[in-house]
Image (cartoon, grey):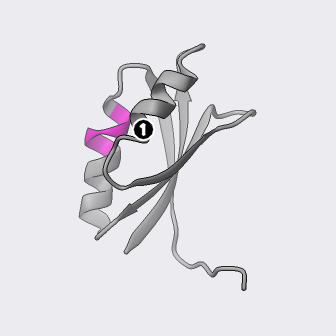
């Protein structure tokens, strides 16, 4: 599995609409509206890098109210026990 976190900037006031749309995208596991430089953080999981690229490029970045994104691909992780 390939895992990434996508930071999203959207148009002012469109955060809730974008959040709702993101949660309908296959591969999006979680999404949160946040305060700071970015408006939303999205956890995306895909079978492989090609599928991840497809989800981010052709779905998340294409939403009407999304202005920009920053993708952070996970290279190593662990869960708290």
Compared with 67, 49 (above or below) is below
Who's the residue at 30% across and 49% down the image? 55
Residue 42 placement (x, y as % from top left): 52, 47
Instruction: Classify residue 2 as left or right of residue 58.
Output: right
Who's the residue at 70% across and 33% down the image? 37
Residue 75 placement (x, y as % from top left): 51, 75
Q: Is 59 contained in the magenta span?
A: yes
Image quadrant containing the C terminus: bottom right
Q: Is 79 contained in the magenta span?
A: no
Residue 23 placement (x, y as % from top left): 43, 41
Who's the residue at 25% across and 51% down the image? 54
Q: Name the residue at the bottom extreme.
A: 81
Compared with 52, 79 (above or below) is below
Residue 71 placement (x, y as % from top left): 49, 50
How many numbered marks does the figure carry?
1
In magenta, the rendered stretch is 57-61
Q: Classify mark 1: residues with Cα within 10 Å, few (<14), some (14-19) or many (20+).
A: many
Q: Label 1 belongs to which residue?
A: 22
- Tell me, yes or no, if residue 66 can be seen here: yes
Q: Quadrant of residue 12?
A: top right
Q: Secondary structure at mark 1?
A: helix
Who's the residue at 45% across and 66% down the image? 3
- Tell me, yes or no, if residue 42 can be seen here: no
Compared with 34, 10 (above or below) is above
Image quadrant containing the N terminus: bottom left
Q: Main secondary structure of the magenta part?
A: helix
* Foreground of the two, 1 or 9: 1
Instruction: Classify residue 30 as left or right of residue 36.
Output: left
């Amino acid at each position: 599995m390939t895992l990434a976190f996508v930071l999203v900037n959207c148009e002012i006031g469109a955060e809730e609409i974008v959040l709702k749309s993101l949660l309908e995208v296959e591969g999006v596991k979680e999404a949160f509206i946040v305060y700071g430089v970015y408006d939303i953080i999205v956890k995306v999981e895909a079978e492989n890098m090609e599928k991840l690229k497809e989800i981010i490029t052709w779905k998340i970045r294409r939403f009407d109210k999304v202005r920009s994104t920053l993708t952070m691909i996970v290279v190593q992780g662990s869960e708290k026990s």
